[in-house]
Image (tube, grey):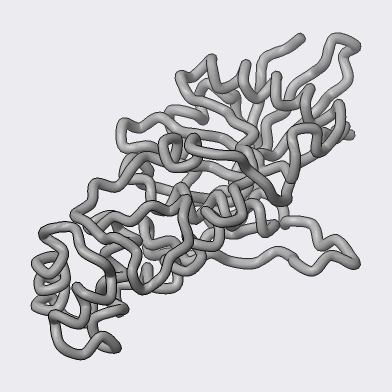
Amino acid sequence: MSGFEVAFAGFGGQAVVQRWVDAAVTVAFEELAPVSAFPVVPGRRWGPGLWWSATTGRHVASGSNAMRAQLMVLDRDPDVVGLAGRPVRLQWHDEQGRRRSWTPQLFARRADGTALLADCPSHPSAGGERALAAALMMERACEQVGWSYLRLDPLDELLAANLRWLAGYRHPRNQVRPALTAAVLEAFARPRPLIEGVEAMGDPIKALPAAFHALWHGHLHVPLDKPLHERVLVQPGTLPSSEALTAAGPHREAGGGRVREVP
């Protein structure tokens, strides 16, 4: 079996092919457009779209509800500094000499310079044997460069719903003004129900967006494995990593890449 190569869309859209071990240390994949479009599947209620990232201030291409859910998790991870959808295709020859390739759905750059390649299947066996075989190859490729590859478990429905709600307030405009943000943090310097804290500041309608913005960014904390409501206990927060956030319970939802032969 030969070594890995990668294909990606360089700046200006020009197609580029390089050795994997070289590209991994020289290419800022988090800055690149998708190497190929996400497929549109007729009859499904969701389709490809864009996720505005609070981490980067830019849009990230997304292909499914499950992928958008994982983008929410990674966008809140304090260790993630860059995100991209399908920026790179890995290519290799199998034991029979046939050329194969796989395009992971997600790329996340970590603060230490390493990266995560990931797919977002709807269930553990999604994509069939080809997807599982490709996952082994992705793990092998990532091990060569000190990165990691994961097939991310779909999120628990309650966790996903809570993240979607808070994500609606991720944009900086919900800070309103620095003085209000400071007041929000002061109001919850000790744990107290959400409604009590915002009412203590005066008009809850003005204070709630800033409170939800602080919750998204981890300046405040609530348990995301329980329903959000007006009396949920809010306390000063330290944002958990994506691994810690998703390790607490069962998971559900949709995605997947595919292995294909390259002519």
Q: Position of residue 254 (x, y in %)?
A: 73, 51
Quarter of the image with the N terminus in it: top right
Res. 8 visible in picture? no
Pinpoint residue 64: horizontal percent, then vertical percent. 69, 57
Closest to the observer, 15 or 31: 31
Which residue appears at 47% of the width and 37% of the height?
Answer: 27
**Image height check: is 174 above or below 232?**
below
- Quadrant where the image shows the C terminus: top right
Q: Between residues 43 and 48, which one lies in front from this camera angle?
A: 43
Q: Residue at x 66, y 43 (%)?
A: 120
Residue 76 higher or lower than 27, as above or below: below
Q: Residue at x 44, y 72 (%)?
A: 168
Residue located at (70% from left, 19% from top): 136
Q: Is residue 42 left or right of residue 233?
A: right
Query: Seen in the image, is 30 located left or right of residue 131?
Result: left
Front residue (pair 122, 108): 122
Task: Return the x and y of residue 239 as percentages of the image width and height.
Answer: 29, 47
Numbered marks: total: 0
Is residue 205 visible in the rendered image? The answer is: yes
Q: Is residue 174 left or right of residue 1?
A: left
